[in-house]
Amino acid sequence: LPVLVIQSRTAAKKSAGHTKNRQHHNRRRKGKGYGPRRTEGERVTPGTMLLKQKKTEVKYHPGL
């Protein structure tokens, strides 16, 4: 009896397009609006936001 052997290989790596960090997934989203809210020399009242930043630690020191 002749024996028929068929070999098959599977992909060793994922195909293109299956990456988690796509480059343009954020295209339609608006920016977060970080940055200064008031400029130098502008009058402000107490409690006015001067700068919007991402982290909780203060990296902005007025007067320096």
Image (spheres, helix red, strand yellow):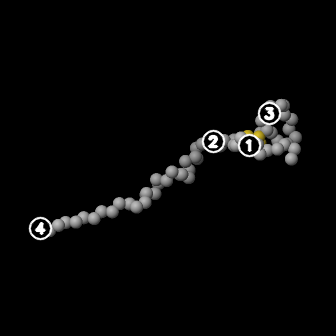
Q: Earlier in the sequence, mark 2 or mark 4?
A: 4
Q: Which residue corresponds to mark 3?
A: 48
Which numbered circle lies on residue 1? 4
Residue 62 appears at what percent x and percent y? 84, 43
The reply to whether dot 1 and dot 4 touch (C-beta < 8 Å) is: no
Please, which residue is most extreme toward the front here? 57
Q: Earlier in the sequence, mark 1 or mark 3?
A: 3
Q: Which of the 4 image quarters holds residue 7?
A: bottom left
The amino acid pointed to by label 1 is Glu
Residue 9 appears at what percent x and percent y? 33, 63
Which of the two discs, 2 and 4, sits closer to the camera?
A: 4
Q: Earlier in the sequence, mark 2 or mark 1?
A: 2
Q: Which residue corresponds to mark 2?
A: 30
**Which element carries disc 2, helix, strand or loop?**
loop
**Which element carries disc 4, helix, strand or loop?**
loop
Q: Earlier in the sequence, mark 3 or mark 2?
A: 2
- Spatial CA distance of label 3 from label 4 is 90 Å
Q: Is residue 36 left or right of residue 1?
A: right
The amino acid pointed to by label 2 is Lys
Q: Residue at x 86, y 35 (%)?
A: 43
- Spatial CA distance of label 1 from label 3 is 18 Å
The amino acid pointed to by label 4 is Leu
- Spatial CA distance of label 2 from label 1 is 24 Å
Q: Residues within 10 Å of mark 2 (few under 14, many from 20)?
A: few
Q: Earlier in the sequence, mark 3 or mark 4?
A: 4
Q: Is residue 46 left or right of residue 56?
A: right
Q: Residues within 10 Å of mark 4 (few under 14, many from 20)?
A: few
Q: Residue at x 43, y 57 (%)?
A: 14
Please, which residue is most extreme toward the left here? 1
The reply to whether dot 2 and dot 1 touch (C-beta < 8 Å) is: no
Q: Nearer the viewer, residue 19 or 58?
A: 58
